[in-house]
Amino acid sequence: MVENVKELLKLHEGITHEVYLDNENSCIVPQEVVAAMLPYFNKTAYGNPTLTHKPGWEAFEVIMNSFQKISRYIGAKILEEITFTPSETEANNLAIMGSCFAQKSRGKKIVVSEIEPVNVLQVAELMGKFGFSTTKIPVDHEGFIDLEKLKEAVDNETVLVSISAVNNELGTIQPIKEAVDIVKAKNSHTLFHTDASDAYGRIPLNVQDLKVDLATVSSYKIQGPRGMGAMYLKDGVNMERILEGQIGTQKLWPGVENTPLIVGFTKASELAFENFEANTTKMRTLRDKLVDGIFNELGDLRYNGPKGDKRSPDNANISILRAEGEALTIELSLKGVYVSSGSACSRRLLQPSHVLIAIGRIFEEAHGSILMKVTRSHTEEDIAYVLSVLPTAVNRIRGIVGSTGVH
């Protein structure tokens, strides 16, 4: 296996231009963020924030400042409503498991959309081991939840509804506020959670305006370091810890706080929000140029998800018929363009994306999809380079498919 990887990497030698568009699955951390983190590994605030000495007090001050800033960026009322976790995955586990365990006396029903990320779907299904049941709400061909089906699903046994603010694969901006109103009207005790990782830093997001009880966000989704996420828990909502250990500055997640990564997440958030309108306008412009260029050059395409203001400004998901997605990611990689085929969570299993199947794409369309996400760091030159190599890569793969008689 190692030798095979070495051979693949050798094939990439000589690449002169690289464009990383696989921001669904990781990111390039900007130098400003790296520079902000470095002192906290060994120069300052490297202590445990619960201990009574200078490095500990420094760490405590830094973490409190980060709580305050992240609270402001998502519209939380008080900084105690924020809990830092090692990633979005842990945040979603805490949000779903912790809230359900705390509310189990009220009922044991969970409602989710059928296009939630796997770290929501799998946790909801895991709760079946503890006596909970899960109901999945269908979506339309653009990925919007069926609000009538949501209304039908919520009953006196429903303890939690979890619907992402923006779908991670399609960029679909869900009507969360309307969904919350529907849920609360049916059962005022039902908690509402939203995975806001693909909304944070890309569309206006205010948890108080949305009236959600819980929300989760991710660091790397906004060009911060991997290994860091956060959960919002509305003041007054009961939650049980799902892990035990030393309690530091936050009561819901034990262990010593990772000060450098918290600083990096906070710095990435600052960069995303300090010029929010300019950043999102740039992403939308680059995304549209990318999509328009691909559709102008190629035929037999399907644009997955909605267009215009109903879609997150960074997201482009296209099914390319007669070109298998995995083959295309490899072909593009050899040219220095890095994209993903569907989501990384399903990619290794060679299964079609559950999201694309849910919106009605057939097997071949789902397997031929590529997902690309632009950032504020991309340039016009980056997009032009992608458009200079992608059509050639697609036509090459289509030629191979055509010559083998496979359709």
Image (cartoon, rainbow, N blue to C red):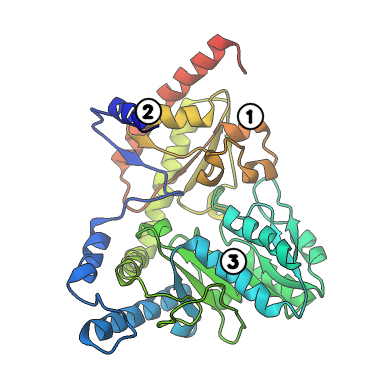
What is the CA distance from the residue labelled 3 to the residue labelled 2? 41 Å
Q: Residue furthest front?
A: 245
**Secondary element at image label 3:** strand
- Which residue is labeled 1 in the image? 364
**Secondary element at image label 2:** helix
Q: Quadrant of residue 117?
A: bottom right
Q: What residue do we see at 24% from left, 77% from top?
A: 45
205 versus 365 height, above or below: below
154 versus 17 height, above or below: below
- Which residue is labeled 3 in the image? 194
Quarter containing the C terminus: top right
CB within 8 Å, label 1 to label 3: no
Which of pointers 3 and 2 indicates the residue nearer the eye?
2
Which of pointers 1 and 2 indicates the residue nearer the eye?
2
Q: Residues within 10 Å of mark 3 (few under 14, many from 20)?
A: many
Q: What residue do we see at 37% from left, 28% from top?
A: 4
Q: Quadrant of residue 50?
A: bottom left
112 versus 252 height, above or below: above
Q: Is residue 296 visible?
A: no
Which of 10 and 223 lies nearest the eye of the viewer? 10
- Disc 1 or 2, which lies upstream in sequence? 2
The kind of residue on which mark 2 rests is Asn
User: How many numbered markers are drawn?
Assistant: 3
